[in-house]
Structures are given as structure tokens and as C-alpha cells.
Amino acid sequence: MSDVNKTIEEILAEEPTNAVPAKPDEGFDYDPSPVGGLLTLGAVGGAAAYFLNRAPGIGRVARVFGTKIPRNPETRNTVPAIKDQVDEVLEIVPTKMDRAKSVLAEQAQRKPSNTFDELGKQIKARVDLNPLSVGGKSTRFGSAAYDFLAKHPSNKPIKAKNWINEFQNENRMGTLKVPNTKIRSNITREELEETNIAKFDKDGKLIGGFLKVADEKNIPVSKFDLLSMIEKSPALNLKTKRHFYVADVDKKTDLAANLFVAKANQAIQKIDNLNDKSLDKYKDDLQNLIIDAKNQKSVMQELVATGKPNIYAPKEINVGAGKLNEFSDEIKKLKGVELISKQEADELASAYRNIERAVQVNKNQASMPKYGQEFSYRERGSEKYFEDVVYYPKDVPFGLNYTGGHYDKLKNQILHTRYGMRSLQENPNKKVYAIDEIQSDYSRSLEDADKVGKRLNPFNIEQEYVFYTALIKNKINQMRELTGKGLKMSVDDQKKVRALDNDIEELKKSTVNAFNMNSQKFRELPPYLPMLERAQYNDYAVKNLIKQAADDGVEWVAVNPVERIHVGRNIGGSGADKYFGAKGNWNVYGGADGRAGMKGLKNKSIKKGDVTESNYQMTAQIPEIFKKLAKQYNSEARMIKISKSDPTKPYKIVEEIHNKTTANKLKLKGAANERHIAAFKTQDEANAYRAGGKDIKVINTDDPDNYYNAFAIKITPEMKGTPFKLYRNQGGLVVNLFA
């Protein structure tokens, strides 16, 4: 590999998102040669570096008229106390990427005319080969803006206004596609805003972001500056933690219980062969222990399938094994007959230890589901149950972390998805992931506290921060030069000093610099995470689950219909104002046919409190996502039939979903108004588990009563092989600027 290619590999490697460091380190220089723009790929952007190269007198700041430069923020993950203002030069700690760029800069000095073009050619080739993958670095999500910039013909720095004009070209940004596919790659306002490249208002006017700073100060910007910002954006650096039961703890419980039952029955037969009525008490005790073991097997099956928290090793099985050993010793003394050998006893003990180890693995990995028992938000009866939490794994710059959410040990949670695995009626060997719920605690917390409009994006803020802090220091140095004249200061000099003082105060108030970053007001800002809007985080959650399904070999992803689960929490009113379900749930999840309501059905707006006709002519949000993805990825989105419970387990614990009046209104008649609480392979297992007098029904695999309707999308090879566009094709926090 050539030195150039090696350096490119380093440049394109993952880098942590940096805020301004706590302490100054080595300085930096902006190279005005043809590689100047390339050198801005690290923690400091082109605007700041360009300015610093041209600002006279950047050095130790003297006290001028009492003005001091405050120390930059200590850390990103803690809120430091307000520090005394100190004289300090603001510098940036060089990163791995910075060091790589220095190597490339040296090469560029030897052949300055080719370096930009060589790098641009390499990045373009990566994007051409791997669209929507951040140049081949991501297999799940990619940036449309990254691909556009990578293919842009301007490799050298150009005016910021040129970039602004590009992004304001609605026709061009809104019609981009991946070549030779149906996949849309339009650039949205939301992506530009969350990367801090540019912030537009509802009318398309530039009101913030790096490009605004660069435009105002006439600073040239290279596409490599912008590519670096995209790579460090929060949405491209998200992680997913999956909560489900691992290590086959249910199967290991089955094996241990079955082994104990076999050995216990073997012991009962040996006692029978002794033909001694005085030993019947041992047989009776063993029969009760067998029932206990079978019961625990059933309980564990249902616990794992349901996803109930706080899993445990069933002691009843271990107690039974101990009693069997004890009875064997006693009967051996009485009759000389061994009910169980030492080897068999060891096998039982080993089988139980396997359960204990599996339970411990689940606890150690913190992988167990937390909310499987919250049945009002899910469809029961799944074969497996999962909870996926999407979070930002790093510290948000300047300590703007979100510490709330359902999963208390996981910082910066953006959303969670609850879903179960079910079987397809057309072929029960094919599996379906059925969505129960998608929720963003972060978004809801800001909405409830009325802080949505009070957020400040701290990502990729280094450019503004460094530039304006340096600008203030430059003006202070100008004041120092003037006041250094002492008595020789002219009237014009005094006017310049006063003007500089006014400029400094204005900059301190209105820009992103060390003064306001250290203020109490800044530290009281709400946390900042991407994908605040419901439509955006739902889009991400659906795509993320589709990718998971493709990885797991699951054939379909469905959304459980509102009429089966969510409606039950919101039924009320009377007469003409009788409503069935929350309008928000209908609009997001939809019914079995994918619509956001039913004809003749009224819903209630939880926020407004009003009862109105349902939007039965409109496709619900998640089914709409399915439809759009199906068009782009050679798939199909339609209503399918999926299992209420494991179709290979015919003994079902069954209950009605709604009363008959509600069921008729929701068009759920007969078996369609039934859910399966649990399913078992044998009558004994079902009887052992049955609680509360629930009905046990025998429903075979091919029985239509085993299935219900749900809207779904089919997983295709294209979905597995091609990353999804990170930001949805339409919408934004306020408007869709580039639809």
C-alpha cells in the first residue's frame, strides 16, 4: 500500500467526536498550500484554522482593560464548576487523524498538484463501490450527503457560498438516487442540521452552522472539511443494545427437567419391583417432585418466550435431584437396591449447573429484557421476545448527555423497540419479527418539559468555537498593541480601542466561544441527541429492525395492529363520542390493513383531548415506511397472517382480547378476538402452567385460528446487502426543505 493510500485509510478510520479539550497541548498550523483544506479534517475545521494562520499576534493574552479569556470546558461528560477566568491560549489536541494528515501534507509538498485529486479520487471510488455506507465503513446506515460530497468535482477549497447554493438547490437535493437502483438518496435539512454543516429555517434561509460562519468570514471550505463533520455526526455513530434471553436457558431447563423426570420414573419402577407397600411414601413423594419439575419447565418456557425479567434457575429441579439421591440412600440401606447411580446423580447435578451458568450469563451480560411483563403495550404469545435500545455510545460534547430513559444503566438512549418472533402461516418454518412498540424517552422528555426549541447542537461545534474565541483574542491583542503606546496614544487610537471593546462584548454575547460555553446558562441547556421527531426515530427503528431481521435470517418484519393491543388502553366516551384508541397510536402503527383508522371509528387525541373520526383513508406511519422501502429494495409490503403463538406447540392458553361490543366494532370476530398467552407441546405442560383458570385449547399448526392479520414487509437480498439511508426521505423537524 502506498503512503498516500495508507494515509487515506487512517483519515477514513473511525475517530471519536471531539469537543474542545480541557487543557492546551501542541499547537497547530493551517497550511495555505493546496492541502490546506485536507488538514482541517481533524478536531479543528477550516474556518478556525484559516483564521488563526492570518490573525496577527496570537500568543499569550495579556490583561487588557480587565478582559480575560476563560478556560475552555473541562470535559464533555461532567459539568465542571465555573472556573476563574485565566489567560490561556486555546489550542487543540492533535488526534490520530491529525497525525495522518500531517503525513499527507508532507507528501503534498513534494507533489502539491496531485494530493487533493488523489484523495478525492480514492474517496469517490469507495462511495461508487459502496453507496450509502460512508465510503464502505457502515453496513447498516449511510449518509446521502456524504455520497454527494464524495462525488463532488471540487476537491480543493471553494467559497462557502458555493456549498450553500448547492444545498439550497431543492430540485437537485430532492431527486438524488443511488445509480442503477430505485434507492433514493436525497439530502434532507435534518441531516445538514444535525451534522452542524448548515441550519436552514422553514423558508430555506441559512441561519446557522459551519457554512454560515465560513460564509460570513469569507473562509474557503473543502469537501473534506464537510466529510469529516459527517463522519463525526451523532446519527452515524449510534449503537444498538439488544435485550433478550441468551444461552438457551429454556432449552437447558427442559433438558434438566426431562432428565430428572426420566430418572424419577425409573426409580418409581424400581420401587414397584420391590413389591413393598411400606415404600409407597417414596413413590408418592417422587410423583409430586415430577409434577414440580414439569411445572418449572413450563414456567421457564413461558418466562423466556414472554421476556419476563429477573430470570432464575428453578430450584425445584435441583431439590428433586437431591431428594432422589436421599431416597436412593435410604432404600439401599433397607433393601440393598440403588435407585440412582453416582454417575446418574452427577449427570443430574451437571444438567442443573448448566441452567445456573446460563442464568448467570444473562445476568453478567445485562442482556435480559426489562419490560416483557408490560402486556398492555405488546401482543403476547411470541416465540421469542426482544427489546432493542438505540443509543449514542460516546459522551455528548460539553456534557449535554441524556441520562434518563427506561434502561437506567445506558446513557444517551434515543429510542427502544419491543418486538417478538412469530411464524408465517404460508410456511411456519419462516419467521417474522412483529413490532409491538417504538418509543423515544428522550423525545418525550423534551416535549413534556417544553424544551424542544431550547436545544443547542454541540456536535462539530469546534469550528465556530475556535474561530470566535480566536477572533476575540485577536481583538484583545489589537487593544494591547494600541494601549502599549501609553501616552503616545492618539485620539484615533482611543476610538479604535473603544470600538474593539464593543466588538469583544458583542462577540462574547452572541457567538459560540469560551465565554458563553463556560456560562451557567450554557450548562443548563437540555441534552442533545439526534432524531428528535417521532417520524425520524420511527424510520430509524424500522430500518434498524429490518437489518437485524436480515442478519438473523428472518423473512418478514410486521407491525402488530392497533386493534389487538394499543386500543385496549384508550376506550371511552359514550354515544356519538365513543372512541376506540388513541389517534397517535393509529397514525403510527395502523391497523391490520396498514390504515390509520377504520371507517365509522372515532379516536381520541391524547394531547388535545378531542374525539374525531379516524384517518381510515390514510396509511399509518410504519406501514408507509414499509411501502416506500419495498419500492426501493425490490420487496413487497402487504397484509400477512402470522402466528398468535408457536404453531408447533398445540396446547394453547387462550383469552379474549376485548368484550364482544368492542370486538365487533374493531371487526374482530370469533377466534380473531383471541390471544395466546402461552403454548406448550403437551397437555401436562399446559396443565402445569395454567393459572387463573384460563382456557386450554388444542390448535394445530395448520388451523387458521392459530394466526392473525398484520401489515408487513418482506426481507430481500437487497436489504441485506445495501445500507439504508440514515435520514428519511421526507420531513424534518419543521418542514421538508428538500422533498
Image (cartoon, rainbow, N blue to C red):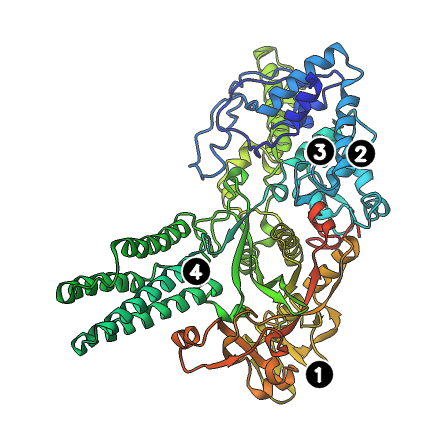
- Write down the quadrant of residue 105 in the picture: top right
Spot the residue most to the left.
Answer: 334
Within the image, what quadrant is residue 694 found in? Answer: bottom left
Q: Position of residue 134 (x, y in %)?
A: 69, 37
Which amino acid type corresponds to the residue marked 3 in the rendered image?
A: Leu
SS class, disc 1 = loop
Are there few (<14), some (14-19), or many (20+) residues within 10 Å of tag 1?
few
The secondary structure type at the circle numbered 3 is: helix
Q: Secondary structure at mark 4?
A: helix
Q: Quarter of the image for the N terminus: give it.
A: top right
Q: Nearer the viewer, residue 133 or 333?
A: 333
Q: Give the SS element for disc 2.
A: helix
Is residue 117 toward the left or the right of residue 42 in the image?
A: right
Is residue 719 something one can see in this rendering? yes
Image spot of residue 290 (x, y percent)? 32, 70
Q: Earlier in the sequence, mark 3 or mark 2?
A: 2
Q: CA distance from mark 4 to mark 3?
A: 50 Å
Give the residue pinned by disc 4. 250
Q: Are marks 2 and 4 in contact (CB under 8 Å)?
A: no
Above or below, comparing residue 461 to residue 204 in the picture: above
Query: Which is nearer the N-term, disc 2 or disc 4?
Result: 2
Please identify, in this view, whether the residue under mark 3 or under mark 1 is nearer the observer.
Answer: 1
Which residue was labeled with disc 2? 151
> Is the Cβ of the residue at disc 3 closer than 8 Å to that at disc 2?
no
CA gap between label 3 and label 2 equals 13 Å
Q: Position of residue 579 (x, y in %)?
A: 62, 81
Q: Is residue 403 left or right of residue 643?
A: left
Q: Which residue in the protein does label 3 denote?
A: 226
Mark 2 vs mark 4, foreground winner is 4
- Label annotation for residue 600: 1
